[in-house]
Every structure is written in structure tokens, then in C-alpha cells.
Image (tube, rainbow, N blue to C red):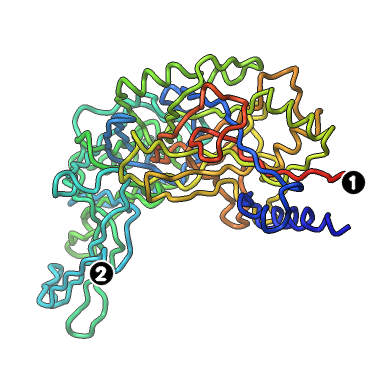
Amino acid sequence: MMKLIPVMMMGIMVLNSCEGELDNLGSQFVDGSEASEKVYALAAYNVNNHDVQNVVTSQYDSVRIGAFSEPVFGGQKVSYITQVRLNSYNPDFGTNPVVDSVVLTLKPRYETAADSTKTTTNEDYIYPDGNVAAKKVVNTYPVRKYGKYKIGKDTPPFTIRVHEVTDFLGGTSDSIKTNKPIAVASTDIGSKAFNGTVNSVVITKDSDASEILNRAASFRIPLKKEFFQDKIIAKQGNQVLKDAASFIRYFRGISISVDESDGYLFSMAPNDAAITIYYKNDVTPTGGGTAVRTAQETSLSLGASNVHLSSIAYQRGSNYTTETQKGVTVEQLKTNDLQINNPATKLYLQGMGGNSIGVRVPISTILQLRNQYKNDKIAIVSAKIRLYNDNTDWDNKYRKPSSLLVKERDTMSRFLPDMTLLSSAGYSLVRTANLSTKDAYYDVSITSTLKKIIEDESYYDINKYNGKDFIIDVGSYLVNSSTGALLGQTYNDRPYNPFRLLLVGSDINNIGNVISNDSKNVQLRLIFTQKQTN
């Protein structure tokens, strides 16, 4: 009975920690005759997604803008495209309305650490509306960037440009491909230089310290007032302003892009953007008299009711193109007898429609483990796929992803059994190590999944497939904001996740074999116990 205690303890630790981090625990709880660790070489391949993803636009809770280029994955340029709607329909702009100015407000996500913030205070500021003596405090924050923080010694400069969209974008429940060409007008409706920062502004009166203005951190782009005078204000009473269906077919949206081709990508929540139209009209005093020109404003909503997406264009390098074309296409993933004729020695993994990877546990390994389960009574207590960063060609300071999306190729729409069976036990799908270094690696925990494959022949039919394949993407799963529950396998941030990663691929000469514990190739790391016989 005492010999079973180490086995029971190991099982309890797996369920409680659910990390599969038992590599060094065997010697602490069991002797060598009771627990074993083996590392198997796996087949890995690139999955060519054609740089495109089909996205339901209502799933966007973040969008990217910018441009970024590096030698491994090539160049990437991302525009933000969104519909706009009136805040209220059939609006009354009053008598003789004339636009004074129009502002597009963007709220990129930004760094908030004290050492990142610059504060400028003007104690002698004069607020122009009424010439009020005041104090103006401006806080400047750097936006969160993925890509190059500097080109040379300077922050990469961007010119952000706004165009009218001339294609109808459809409804929020529609799917749109991320490389779908979206037509825009040839002439922009506004632009502004962007130095990678956003500002918050607080203005208070000198007389009583009351606030005149309190503006949250944002980036404000002036838009052409003549365009909005003609497009919106002058259409007062016209059918095109009377309901949403008419309006989104009349004013179909805006595109926000950058002129440059290299720098960084930044993100923002699409619902935070807005267009404000400032105008004046004639207001006659109550009881009569001379009309007074009076300041007014109205807003256009860029919020959740609108279609919005990141439109992505790539310029790939020759190595990326060559290697991904040797892999399989996303269409071929649907075939049962998928042949892996060219296991990849380098694996290209990228969000936003870029490459996925496939990792195959060969039939030979599955059969070997099934035989050991039946005949030698082994019990798998930890199973993980380990992926190592390619520290020769991906030796840079770009941030590495901290999460991955994983699914079984034969059941693409569901979560791994581990994610459902162990969800209440603190299970983590992916564990990372050394992310800030070139020696980073990722462990994908598949203990429950592999146990089902080995122990339940009805779960996995070896006569139907050539191996058990796991498809891996850069990304994080989305959760219900109220409950924290995962929304589903297809609900994730991959459409706007900017990360990319080059991984070490297959040990081609040893696929299916036991390999050295020190190998950096794609591998299956197992810890299993074996029932002792007297």
C-alpha cells in the first residue's frame, strides 16, 4: 500500500497545479522504478493561412493601426476601418448652421507607469473662451507599441490619415476577410503627425480652482470642416439622415491609416473613438429679438453598433514565403489523411492572419503508448508539447507572445479536454519560460487529452488519421466580461494580435523516437508511472 502513495501524490499534484511541471518531481516522490520521463520527437509543419482570416466583425474588442517591418516575417501595414452613425436621427441643427471645426478622437492604449509619464504645467494659461486666467496641466503618455520603439535614436514618426470609405461594410454579424480590399476616397478628410504619445488635459480657474476642462488621454485629429458641412449639416431634413439603414449606406465609414511603412503597431478599443462636429447656429432669444450665433456640437458614433476591423496588408520576404509554401494550407487541414511530406525545421507563427503551425504525435508513438498502457499498465501523469524559440534567427528584443491558441485538428471548434475537464482546478493551457530572452520556450499542457487518446480508442481512431495533430496559433481566448468564462474556441484575439514567433521545428531524422532531454526540437515530454509487480 505504501508504494502507491507516491503515485497518488503525483496525481494530486498534477490536478492541483495542472502545470505538468513534474520534470524534477519524480525523484522527490517516487524512485526510478515507479516513474519515468521520456521525450519524443514530434512532426511539425507550417500552416499557410494565405495571410488572411475570416472575422465576424462584432468580435473585435481591439484594433490595430500602424506599420512594422522586420527581416523574418516581412512588412505589415494595418489600417482601422469603421462605420459611423449619427447619435440621433433626423437631427435638427437649427437655423443657418455652419461648422466651425471637426475632431476625430482616438484613445490608444498607453503606458501608465510614473517613469513613462511627462507632466507639463502652465500656471499662467489664459483660457480663450472668456479670457479666463487658469492653470493648464498636460500629462503625456507613450502609447503601447509592438515593433520598433526607436529607429536610430528617434521614435518612428507616423502621419495618421483619415479617408472616407466608399464600400458598404455590411452588418456587425457579417464575416469579413482581413485582406479584403476596402475602397476609400482618393482625397483624405484629415491628417496629423503622430509622435507615439497621447495627452490628457486639465484646466482649472485661478479664481476658485474649479475645472473648466478635463479631457482624458487621447489623440485628436482635426478633420476637414467643409466635408462635414456638406456631408452632414447641409443634409438636414434629407432622407439620408432619417434612419440608420439609410445613413450607413450614404456615409459608409472612415479609414484610419499611416503613410509610413515601418515603425510599430498600436492598439485601441474601437468603441472609444468618436467624431465631434462643432458648429454655430442662429438662436433667437425667448420673447424675440435679434438672433445670436450660438455654439453647438453633435457627435458621430464609432461604437459597438458599427462594423469595424483591422485591414491588413503584408509584404513577405523570400524565406518566409518559401518555408510556408512547403507546409500545408488551411484548406488541407480538413482532410483526414493529411500527409506531412515536408516536416518543417523552422516554424513561423504569427497573429492577424499570419502562419499557424501544426504539431503531430505520430501513429507509431500513439501505438507504443497504447501498448504500454495495456500491457505494462503505465499511467500518464504529465504530458506537454514543448516549443523552443529559434535563437539563431529570432534573436531580437521584440516582445514574445505569452499565450497561444490550441485545438485538435480533427475537432477544430472545441476546446481541448484539458481545458474543460480541469477548468476548475486552475489549469493553464500554456506555460512559458525565459520570455525576455532568446532561450524562451512554451509548454502546452495536454495531459488529459493524451490520456484519452491512449486509454480510450473510441476517442481517437488510428485507422482514420495519420497521427494526432494539434493546431497552434498566436493569440488569447476571449472571456465573458461578467463571468470570466471562456466564450469558445473561435472567440479569440488572433485577428488583431500583433505577435509573431519563430520556433525550432522537427528533428526530421528522429520523428516518433525517444530523443535527448536536452533537445530543442518540437517534442512531447511525458511523465508516467508504472504499476509495480512483485
| For residue 171, above or below residue 338 | below
Which residue has dot 1 on it?
Answer: 534
Q: Nearer the viewer, mark 1 or mark 2?
A: 1
x, y percent for residue 199: 24, 60
252 and 484: which is toward the camera: 484
Q: Residue furthest front?
A: 534
Residue 504's quadrant in the figure? top left
267 and 133: which is toward the camera: 267
Which residue has dot 2 on it?
Answer: 213
| For residue 33, above or below residue 253 | below
x, y percent for residue 308: 41, 38
Residue 331's quadrant in the figure? top right
> Could you say which disc has been placed on residue 439 in the image?
none
x, y percent for residue 73: 34, 30
209 and 75: which is toward the camera: 75
Mark 2 residue type? Leu
Residue 489 seen anywhere in this rendered image of the structure? yes
x, y percent for residue 98: 19, 49
Q: Circle 2: is it few (<14), some (14-19), or many (20+) Cα within 10 Å?
A: few
Q: Is residue 132 left or right of residue 351?
A: left
Q: Secondary structure at mark 2?
A: strand
Q: Is residue 199 left or right of residue 401?
A: left
Figure quadrant of the N terminus:
bottom right
Q: Is residue 343 left or right of residue 413?
A: left
The residue lying at 84 percent from left, 33 percent from top is 374
Residue 98 seen anywhere in this rendered image of the structure? no
The residue lying at 54 percent from left, 28 percent from top is 358
Alpha-carbon span between mark 1 and mark 2: 83 Å
Question: Which numbered disc, 1 or 2, marks the residue that appears first in the sequence?
Answer: 2
Mark 1 residue type? Asn
Q: Circle 1: is it few (<14), some (14-19), or many (20+) Cα within 10 Å?
A: few
